[in-house]
Image (cartoon, rainbow, N blue to C red):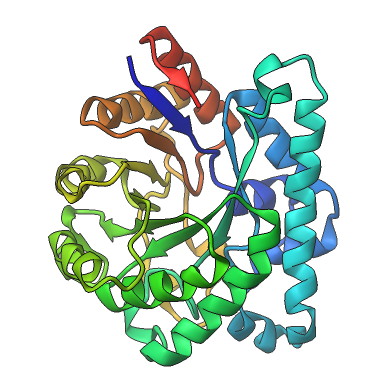
Amino acid sequence: MSQITLLDGGMGQELVHRAGDRPTPLWSTQVMIDHPGLVQAVHADYFAAGATIATTNTYAIHRDRLIKAGIEDRFAALHGAALAEAAAAIAAHRATKDDNAKQGRVGRIAGSIGPLVASYRPDVHPPHDTAVALYSEAAQLLAPGVDLILCETVSSLAHARAILQGAQAAGLPVWLSVTVDDADGTCLRSGERVADLAQILELGAGTPTAILANCSSPEAIGATLAILAGFGLPFGAYANGFQQITPAFLQENPTVDALSARHDLTPAAYADFALSWVAQGATIVGGCCEVGPAHIAAIATALRAAGHELV
């Protein structure tokens, strides 16, 4: 059968739930500041569940968010803190009796770069040159401590072009992950066609080594993967467990309490979605917001039962 890379699940929402604090616009960054060690604990639980990659808690560490909170001077230090917690989790995991972990087959780190300004808001994405410089800065900070750059929740063609170009500054493999319309997986959140991402790949803005879909309804992902499969790159998906992206969350300075988790997306149900993506040819699967360690454990169990190898 296939070799499958099993990503972790959502970091931000998992941190918010475990901290129990009222969410702020800084989201998971605020939790990391207020609760040192909690990020490492979440990484550890995902590794224990079967994940082979830790995604750094850097999605929301952007200057535009930190400026509003009055802590822009902590930009580099916060990236360093997130990298340290991921590295500590991997070191602890490799110190266990898991032979795969000891031999380094488990425990890669993906450096997350989320959208500038706001998620799901292609209308507020900065101009190209501004965005490239900011994404490049983040990529360079992540580079010394990660194995690859994961460009997450990319909602438009302009966003994809800028983040791919900026991420090249890391000098590492880059995975591009797009977010799609929850009702129509053939379209990005911007309304542009997923198929038109091919134009950006042809322009050579920084060809990714894998292409994925994330933070979208799992029901929409199948249509997306049918398109991504034609790009000639490894592909995959990690969906979210939100009921919907509400109008309140699309306002300025939103907090995640404007969103609600689904109650029907059990670990078993989510694992069924992941197996269907693998049946379409996906070799990278995992989870995004509201998909936790239990979901990842269910995917790991189902993949192994189907004869796949986790790498």
- Is residue 39 at all visible to an observer of this figure? no
The residue located at (78%, 50%) in the rendering is 85
Q: Is residue 190 left or right of residue 130?
A: left
In this rendering, the answer to whether 235 lies above or below 27 is above
Q: Is residue 275 left or right of residue 44?
A: left
Location of the N terminus by quadrant is top left
- Is residue 237 at all visible to an observer of this figure? yes
Which residue is at the front of the view, 89 or 24? 89
Q: Residue 193: where, in percent of width, then height?
A: 14, 65
Q: Is residue 170 left or right of residue 246?
A: right
Q: Residue 34: where, in percent of width, then height?
A: 83, 62
Which residue is at the front of the view, 236 or 23? 236
The residue located at (49%, 64%) in the rendering is 258
In this rendering, the answer to whether 249 lies above or below 301 is below
The residue located at (27%, 58%) in the rendering is 180
Asked where in the image residue 33 lies, by quadrant, the reply is bottom right
Q: Residue 209: where, in percent of width, then height?
A: 37, 52
In this rendering, the answer to whether 214 lies above or below 191 is above
Asked where in the image residue 126 lies, by quadrant, the reply is bottom left
